[in-house]
Amino acid sequence: MTEPVRGPDLSGLKIDARARRIPANRRWVVLSAGLVALLLVAGGLYAFLREAVAEVEVATVRADKGGRPTLLNASGYVTPRQRATIAAKITARVNEIFVDEGMSVEPGQVLAKLDDSDARARLASAHADQNATAATVGDLRVNLENAEREARRIEELWERRLVAEQARDQARMAVDSLRARIVLAREQVAAAAARVKIAQQDLDNCTVRAPFGGIVVSKDAQRGEMVSPVSAGGGFTRTGIATIVDMASLEIEVDVNESYIARVKAGQPVTAVLDAYPDWQISGKVRTVIPTADRQKATVKVRAAFDKLDPRILPDMGVKLTFLGDERAAPTAAGRVLVPRTAVREEGGGAAVFVHREGRLERRAVKLGQARGNEHEVLAGLSDGDQVVTAGINELRDGQNVRVKR
């Protein structure tokens, strides 16, 4: 039987135990290198996490310099007293339109021209009727003069008893008839003139003008569309040409709870803060308190006028209104400042803010005073000029690295 082929015998090969041992000094080097590498990795990870900064919005705290006491806060909108959607008085097609959104218009300025071909035809027809009626008056006058001469001759002949009395009566009747027809013709001329005026008015109605000066805030029709003073055509007919707002008539309208309406009176000073410009306080006065209440909302409408208008104030902007007292408060003590209300975080009955200082956040506990429109009075914890974070404060932490959003 054939013996199996055997490979080389490796059982005799071995590594000397002394060679497998790592010297103590080398083991210490390996451990030290591993520890250093671990520390470097941990430090790099920590540094990376610390350098992952968030962007924040900040506002500068300003000192409270005193002023009138706050009696009431309310929210509402900027509304114009004079706003109008300009419509045509007739149903016609738009031939030309001369305005666009944002344009300023003067009183009487042409906004659009409508198709006036029918109106011009009616005006020409009315003029023709007036001329024809006026021509009949001239013909009747000639006939009247002739009838009067004939009547005088008949009268002379009748006095000499050369004609019968019936001929004299007929001559007189002819004169009176022509005089009556002339009166009628003159009335017909006046009626024709009135029809001319109506036709002219129809033609003038084809030109749409601005009833007052202002800004065009909406362009409601285009060239080629049909416009009408009433809705027609299954929704394909426009009822307006453009909407104009008198920017000089802008004011504030707010709803005040009827429980507090006794605190409001005409002429009372107010401070308005637009939602679009939260750091801008605008002074004004109560113009009127609308003498009726809304039974569903239990509120009363109050309108306030701006002391000075600004181009940044636009219709339908949201606004927060603060009603002030009549007497000025004494200057506040040092340390009292005003901060945006969005910068304050409620914490278990207390309040805190995040102060931005050299790229790092610092949590500050603060003592709050009264709310003033879009701001809050801080009695302690902040100083004039501090920068506080105004957005996303619930996601921030003390000591966090941040950068200011530009």
Image (cartoon, helix red, strand yellow):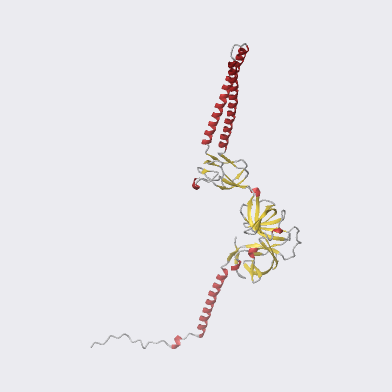
Q: Quadrant of residue 376?
A: bottom right
Question: What residue is at 55 percent from the left and 30 percent from the top?
Answer: 127
For the residue pair 136 and 79, the one nearer the viewer reads as 136
Left-right relation of 16 to 336:
left
Quadrant of residue 123 within the rendered picture: top right
Judge left or right: residue 236 versus residue 72: left
Q: Nearer the viewer, residue 251 or 32?
A: 251
Q: Is residue 302 visible?
A: no
Residue projecting furthest to the left = 1
Residue 324, given in percent of the width and then of the height, sits at 71, 58
Question: Which residue shows up at 56% across the image and 27% down it?
Answer: 133
Decide: is 179 above or below 96: above
Residue 132 at x, y percent in the picture: 54, 26
- x, y (%) of residue 229? 55, 44
Residue 294 % position (x, y): 64, 57
75, above or below 123, in the image: below
Evaluate whether residue 74 shows in this view: yes
What residue is drawn where x is 56% and y is 29%? 130
Does 305 appear above or below 141? Answer: below
